[in-house]
Amino acid sequence: MMIGFVGIPAASDHCHMRLRNGLIHQGSTRPNHCRPRTVIRCCSTTRGRSRDYYQVLGVTVHSTPQEIKEAYRKLQKQHHPDIAGYKGHDYTLLLNEAYKVLMRNLSSRRADGKSRGRSFGIGYTGDGYSSWNGPVRGQALFVDENKCIGCRECVHHAARTFAMDDVLGSAHVEIQFGDLEEQVQLAVESCPMDCIHWVESQELPVLEFLSRPQPKEGHGIFGGGWERPRNVFAAAKNFARRLQREEEEMEREQSSRSHGGAEGEAETEAQAEARRRAGEELRWKPLLDVWNGLRGQKKGGTDP
Amino acid sequence: MQPGSSASPLLLPPSTAFSPLHSPLRSRSHCNCSSPRLRRSIAKHRREVARAVTVAFAWPQMSEHFYTVASDSETTGEDKPQQSFPDVAIGIDIGTSKCSVAVWNGNQVELLKNTRNQKGMRSYVMFKDDTLSAGVTGAAARENGHEERDILSGSAIFNMKRLIGRMDTDEVVQASKSLPFLVQTLGIGVRPFIAALVNNMWRSTTPEEVLAIFLLELKALVEMHLKHPVRNAVLTIPVSFSRFQQTRIERACAMAGLHVLRLMPEPTAVALLYAQQQQQFMHDNMGSGIEKIALIFNMGAGYCDAAVAATAGGVSQIRALSGCTVGGEDILQNIMRHALPSFDSLYAGQTMDRIKSIGLLRIATQDAIHKLANQDTVEINVDLGNGHKVSKILDHSEFEQVNQAIFEKCENIINQCLIDAKLVPEDINDVILVGGCSKIPRIRSLVLGLCKKEISYKNIDALEAAVSGAALEGAIASGVTDSSGSLDLLTIQATPMNLGIRAGGDSFAAIIPRNTTVPARRDMLFTTTHDNQSEALIAVYEGEGERAEDNHLLGYFKITGIPAAPKETVEISVCMDIDASNVLRVFAGVVKPQGPAVPPFIEVRMPTLDDGHGWCGQALAKMYGKTLDLAVLPKKLQP
């Protein structure tokens, strides 16, 4: 989750809280431009936010472009300033942004994702949700939200680093190294469930992605809802392996496709004709050789 | 109906409503009125119009707020006054050649007719000895047949839409010098001098003033029809209008006592009408909201625009817009020069001879072009006096050859529009052709050919579409709802031009790219170019050019008190915000380093420029280009 600029945790905190709440009240919390600073900081576009854009438009990660368009139009009809007056301005800005990002994501997903039919890990962008205060370090903090009981101990000790999600009833890391090292260490030790872990930084995005509740596939009225893996760490290993395999596969596919594609595209009609002739020649050559040889022999036989 | 000729008794003395003391013309300190004499005549005209209107009804509520538009900020924002009458914004289409006005009457859009039963009223203002009269009533030209000749006598100013807000270096202004009234240019980027012939004397005026007089008559016509005062209006403008030109339109409206609720690009108004028709059609067929994509091509006398709109469920979403400044006027001038090759040399200087001859040639050529839409060849045969005669037979191929450059420009804007919308011709469901020039066969075949269509969309009237769309938008933005659902509509606009600032010498850093959905807000980080640079100049431009100089300057301001730091370490954020009524605000300030030593952000409403700006950008670049420069900060890698 990366909004605004590095080093201003307060501002991004503010934004994040609002995004979490689905931004329904944005118009009323910020009716005009009297606080330009927060206004400005809220408008940086970052990829990590696309998760929240699904919430803004009220669509799921599996929605089709048609559904996204319909949702966008429906919301625009309620909130566009032409209809809702000036208070609709901020919300419409967010709608426009969400629509733009989701449609772009969708088209890129269609471009490279359709052929390989990736069925898992949709929405995984490779970015973590927590942002970094200062440079990226080798180790990062991760809260196992399955174990977290929502005691708020960590938030109490390191308020900038940890944040409480009241909907899920668990804490998560908001900004890596948001507080002083001692404070962070104290927070880790204070956890009664020992569910705050130091992990490798490159593992963090997968862990954070998997610890978000994923929509569960439903069949009619059965199933559906949201789930997250029981053991995040095991799931993360599994996920990373699958991801790697898929990526390799995709690379292979892409290289072969681009190879074949280039050939197919470059071939003009004349070239196709030439290729056909060459093929025919190859097929008939032995026979022709035999025939010519025979004729030659015949000729040779008759001439002398 | 002539002013004051109504049989109804005068219910209210005109002085209460249209007193010059309350009029914006009088209370504006810099209202562009060129002379007290003209100001008097406008005031007098205003009184006359008022008399014509007030006879019809008593004003329900007429307090001072009716003319509060006289304040300096031309659009006063959301300060809607308390009104007892239903305040539905009217829709106005000010065309280069003809104007029309429409209003939502509760059930549907109604186009208003003037006393001569015209829906499209010729756009001009006639200057007479001590009176002014606009083309709405056509009081100056009683007999229909002679109206056009009177307009071309030099006493009338027309084509104001092509002149308004333009500098004298502009090629459109240069081309207007062959019109019968006086257009004088100095070629240094200031406003041109225009004047009308009154009693064999040139009397100066401005395009804003002319438009204001016209709008005043138009407003009176509407008020007479609706029997209550109107205040809010939605006007259509060409896509290629700069923000500076838009402020000129707003000023003209303010002078006429109209508050501009929205200025919408002409093709988007047509798109809204199309959305309504599609929704109606869907209702009838019980269908769901299937998305339909329309390409709208609008070519009038002065401008040519194209737009691509995606429509579903009454929402029309503008995907791309493009426009340029060619129109029927250019076609007309090309043909005039073609018919009389010695056109420019023959009539140097604005003499009476020239005015008369050009007027005759103009009428003959215009007739010929109109006829050519329906027949294969046409003859231009006119005696210009002084032994000059024009006799020419014009056919389609010749006509097309002479105007080749214009057709190419039309082609370019359509192609541009399709590319910007990321569509191919096969994606287009309907092609809508509107505007006077859409009757020209070559234009029709060109647009349909580019979109690979056989026929154009039928249910839209080419001359009434834009004004109907504007009236619909007026009703929607005024909060009118309709039980039958025919106002359950929305148009989602897009920006027609890039908006950005000057950075890194003379380059242009676009912050909001064109075709961004409105409302829009984007920001960008910049940094200093010198060590310990304490000030930075933010010069805001609009346009398509790579270099800042190629674009329109909208305004400028300085960020001061930047904390001392080595170059390229300070981060300055420039954020641009466009709201639904197309108001542009620029926020700028230092975001890194943080602390109490950093000055507060600056919010500036654009454009700040009030008058000619040809020299302004150059002067700024020369004085501060090096010292107060900014550079674009490359997007930081995400941690």
Image: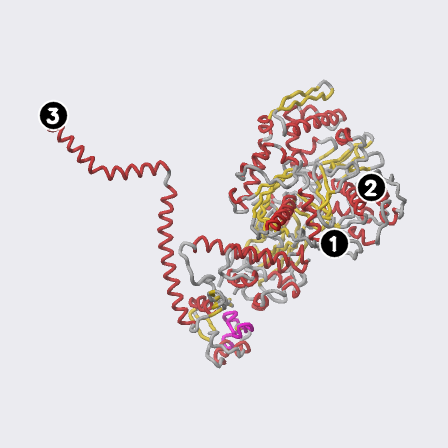
Parent chain of label 2 = B
Residue B625 sits inside the magenta stretch: no
Q: Are marks 3 and 2 on the same chain?
A: no
Q: Is residue B592 above or below residue A296?
A: below
Measured as percent of width and height from the top left, residue A49 is found at: 53, 62
Q: Are marks 3 and 1 on the same chain?
A: no
Estimate the spatial distance between the alpha carbons at disc 3 and disc 2, rounded to whole Å.
116 Å
Instruction: Magenta stretch: give its range.
Output: A163-183
Estimate the spatial distance between the alpha carbons at disc 3 and disc 1, rounded to whole Å.
110 Å
Foreground: B620 or A35?
A35
Q: Which residue is mark 2?
A: B42
Measured as percent of width and height from the top left, residue A6 is found at: 54, 64
Binning the other alpha carbons within 10 Å of mark 2 as few (below 14), some (14 to 19) or many (20 upward) gives: many
Nearest-to-viewer mark from 3 and 1: 3
Estimate the spatial distance between the alpha carbons at disc 2 and disc 1, rounded to whole Å.
24 Å
Badge 2 or badge 1: first in the primary sequence: 2
Q: Which corner quadrant of the image does residue B449 belong to?
A: top right
Q: Is residue B373 above or below residue A179?
A: above
What is the secondary structure assignment of the residue under circle 1? loop
Look at the image and tell me whether residue B614 can be seen. Answer: no
Residue A177 sits inside the magenta stretch: yes
**In the image, is B170 to the left or to the right of A61?**
right
Task: Give me the disc on residue B76.
Answer: 1
Parent chain of label 1 = B
Task: Give me the disc on residue A303.
Answer: 3
Pick the quarter of the image with the N terminus of chain B.
Answer: top right
- Mark 1 belongs to which amino acid? Thr
Instruction: Work out which residue is located at the far top of the displayed protein and give it.
Output: B387
Q: Which corner quadrant of the image does residue B193 belong to?
A: top right
- Mark 3 belongs to which amino acid? Asp
Report the residue at 75% width, 46% height from top.
Answer: B253
- Figure coloring: secondary structure
